[in-house]
Image (cartoon, coloured by chain):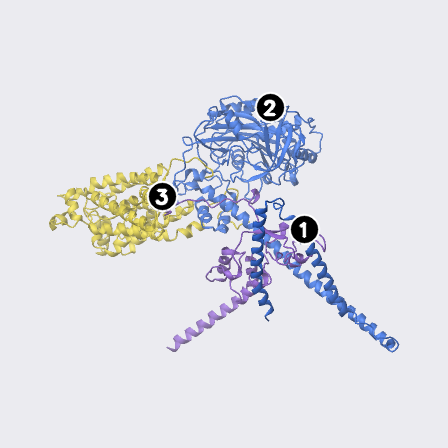
Chain colours: A blue, B purple, C yellow
Amino acid sequence: MSRKLFKFKGGVHLSEHKAESNARPLHAAPLPGKLVIPLRQHIGNPAKPVVEVGERVLKGQMIGAADGYISAAVHASSSGIVTAIGPAAVPHISGLPDLCITIETDGRDEWIAHAPLDYQAMAAADLRMKLRDMGIAGLGGAVFPSAVKLDPGAAHSCPTLIINGGECEPWITCDDMLMRNRAGEILQGVAVMRHLLGSTEILVGIEDNKPEAIAAMQAAAQSLDFAVEVVAVPAIYPAGGAKQMIETLTGKQVPSGKLSTDIGIQVFNVGTAYALACAVHHGEPLISRLVTVTGHVLRPQNFEVLIGTPMHTLITLAGERDDSTGALMGGPMMGMPMPDLEVPVVKATNCILVKSNALFPPLPKALPCIRCTRCADVCPAELQPQELFRFAKTGDFGRAQEYHLFDCIECGCCSYVCPSHIPLVDFYRYAKSEIWAREKEKRAADLARERHEFREFRLAREKKEKAEKLAAKAQAARTQAGLDQAKRAELPAAPAPELATAPSDADAKKALIAAALARAQAKKAEVAPKNTDHLLPATQREIEEIEARRAKIHELARQPLESEEKKP
Amino acid sequence: MLTAILVMVVLAVTVGLVLGWSAVRFKVEGNPLAEKIDAILPQTQCGQCGFPGCRPYAEAIAKGEADINQCPPGGEEGIKKLAELLGVEPKPLDEAHGAPKPKSVAFIDEQLCIGCTLCIQACPVDAISGAAKQMHTIIAAECTGCELCVAPCPVDCIAMVPIAEDLPHWKWKYPVIELKRVA
Amino acid sequence: MPSPFILDRSSVTQVMAWVLAALLPGVAAYVWLFGPGILVTLALATVTALAAEAAMLKARGYPAKPFLTDLSAIVTAWLLALSLPALAPWWLIVTGTLFAIVVAKHLYGGLGQNIFNPAMVGYAVLIVSFPVQMTQWSGPLALTETPLTLAQSATVIFGGDVPKTTLDAVTMATPLDALRTGLLQQLTVDEIMTQPIFSQFGGVGFEWLAAAFLLGGLLLWALRIISWQVPLAFLAGIWLAAGFLHFFDAGRFGAPWFHLFAPSVMLGAFFIATDPVSGATTPRGKLIFGFGAGLLTIIIRTWGGYPDGVAFAILLMNLSVPLIDQYTQPRVYGTSGRGKEPPA
């Protein structure tokens, strides 16, 4: 442990609450009767469904294909019948539904044919495509498609690879349990990452409050044919944030608005490394993950859960208790409240934290900001949260951006220490999404302007072309006329050419439109009243009366208009 | 007395010269006013302001021929921005030009469309595809929701559908912190 | 309500309570060295401040309870009371407190919105409007033969009948006043310092009062309720400015230690200039703010029309806070230069 560590600015010490859930052994959650698998589980384009309702799918079968470069596939977590493809409740704070594939499981848990990948023999690009198709995405919370992060790009290599076992949020222990139980597999995944990124220095950062995990990882690192340094980092929230982990281990800061790869560093969560190992060494796509179920439950513990399992099933497994006040996905600092507990576990679900008033008392009412700058003292992004709050509150988004709003990592430290109990992070989220929406709106307006201007140009051009054509025709007619003049004496007067045909053209068009109109109205009449086919005579009479009244009103409404039209 | 007047005159001339010189020297080669106004307008091209599009309206405002409160799609916020740009007091939207509505896109009932191309000719941003006697359809991503296609349709097959909030369009709301008594 | 779902135990009430607690050593020293009169002043200011706060909250349509229990009004009242002469008449205390709470705090938008430190606004209004009454300091007990009891002090404050001789026996000029008057009489500093009110460092009793405020201030710093930047820069500003002048003409300018150990300086450095609402927020801004206030204090003491300049110095620096903050924005994580950068 000779490595020199660096201290990132800010951060807070939180009570850990890890012992509740990491004392019990890891269990696999039983197969649920129904799996709901959202197609948008990662950052980037949602996957496109490639199965149909009624189709039988096997465990590990791709049911949604990656759409574009920044995307990832989704897979059936067990075998069964696809019963629905459509909007369903997803774990998102808004409570809005999103496109999901629902599978009624058949209990046989039958795997699709799969085989390990010989990753060393594969071309890097092919391997990355394969990983994208196996749905590998970051399991630390951001769910960024791993295939993209495993592309060293123009630099051809990424010298430093950091495996993040920080897990600094209170209550969550899934990474801890993974490292204790599956250290070897994690490092197999690291080997694949090292292969793709060409890294020479591999660091595993683990908070020093997880001695068992550190020991397990160190033991597993002994048997590798490359060097992996397992480093204990001081436990201070948010030491597990990627940027903070980089600074702690290397002393470098990721430049604002850039990626860590720009300074030759890539960071992966331990869970991602494990998923990668399963994909490469067993050919198994990402269909399960470890989930901590803790808080206000009887037996807080970690489960290995199939993606798509309803959260409520897991809460029941861990022993549901009375007086719960809802659940969070994630920890208490950055977790999101779930609109209902039937939403499925997704790739991003690291923890289901059941709340109660005793564990998480309702937050006290906010007071005005007194500019005490405690938020600035604890901000790991070294921002001035009190200023950002002022700008976000008054809608001065330009200034908020000038003060680096988008460098905020939403860790919640500022809200945690605020003596006025202001939900600061909420204001930053609001300001960010407002700025994004405005940018979107602006892009739409620019597109509309461009298209409108092009249309004006096109109309002008068409008009000009028409005029030119007419002029050419007239010219031709004149020359023709000149030629004809000679023959005038011999031939009788020719009928007037264009003048006559033009209106008749318009007439023909009108007639056509009228005919089509009649057809459409007939169709409309046919289409519209579906519920009037079989009616009692009394109802029929009633309808007729109403119709008559309606016609009369129509008539009355039309008259003054028409008379007005006729006037001048 | 004479010296004082002389000093003042010399001072005035010098200052005037400096100002005149800097006006020429540091002239801002920027957007003319109409362009800046056009950048604020929502580009719906709906013509509710009484001008055939956003650009003509912007030019009219720049020339002082039109007021800033004639754009319903721009809403209160648009008026506020225009007022800020032009250094005038914001005023409420002129109801004579219509009321603001939720953002919508046009939708063609393809069962009823007769392929008359009248809506295509009306669309200010060419967001309807189709040809004579062929069914038409709206390119939703390019539709500005101006409603100009609704009136010309002889079979009333175009409806304005408000854009529903979905996950990619969901926004964080303004946090509610109550300091004041509500009652 | 989104994350985070846990909070630190801190609150505005807690912060203000610690400030009040940190003032207690000063209050105790005050009573010990100058008699119990200050307790009457403190009580009167507190009652007035709470009443004014409640009335203003009601008028502005805010709930009274969260804002009255935040204790910020009491802090303002105490800071003002401790800046006033111990035997100031009741109406002076009430006027100052009312002005501080009603005008300087609530008319600017209430808690967190005031540009100026309310207590210092109250003080400034009083010293400009009632300069004579603002000199009724009770002298240190060590120099008075028959000190006033609590009841007698109350009688004086509430305008009751007290023999003029008794009053004359207890009120005396503060060391800063004495220095000022002496210098106006063309005396040298050394000659002035022979007066009984002066001692080793500052004034008899005054230096210990200053030390008690320093003690309370260090407590606030140890609890991280105030940052080190403002007090240190403030004291450094005083020391350097006074030292500079004293170095060039020791006969006309007081010694830096003398200036430093005036109670108003310690109170200002640790309790008033550190007021977060009206002070600078950035680390470098706090240094500039504190140093500027210290410098201005000495300038006003030396050349200004009033014996002490802490209040005016802090108010002047309050004015420049937005500018200071804007130009001292600290480096943000992952950015190279200091200050802000244009948006990408």
Whether callout 1 and callout 2 share a subunit is answered: yes
Q: Looking at the image, is mark 3 or mark 2 nearer the viewer? A: 2
Q: Chain of mark 1?
A: A
Residue placed under numbered mark 3 in the picture: C232
For the residues labelled 1 and 2, the Cα–Cα distance comes to: 69 Å
Q: Viewer-proximal residue, C82 or A13?
A: A13
Label 1, secondary structure: give it: helix
Residue A305 screen position, x and y as percent: 57, 27
For the residues labelled 3 and 1, the Cα–Cα distance comes to: 87 Å
Name the amino acid, label 3: Leu
Name the amino acid, label 1: Lys
Question: Does the image show residue A202?
Answer: no
Q: Looking at the image, is mark 3 or mark 1 nearer the viewer? A: 1
Q: Is the C-beta separation of discs 3 and 2 under 8 Å?
A: no
Q: Residue at x 74, y 64 (%)?
A: A505
For the residues labelled 3 and 2, the Cα–Cα distance comes to: 55 Å
Name which quarter of the figure residue C227 lies in: top left
Name the amino acid, label 2: Gly
Name which quarter of the figure residue A110 lies in: top right
Instruction: Classify the position of the C terminus of chain A by image quarter.
Output: bottom right
Q: Is the C-beta separation of discs 3 and 1 under 8 Å?
A: no
Residue A39 screen position, x and y as percent: 61, 37
Residue placed under numbered mark 1 in the picture: A523
Question: Does the image show residue B170?
Answer: yes
Whether callout 3 and callout 2 share a subunit is answered: no
Residue placed under numbered mark 2 in the picture: A184
Whether callout 3 and callout 1 share a subunit is answered: no
Label 3, secondary structure: give it: helix
Q: Chain of mark 3?
A: C
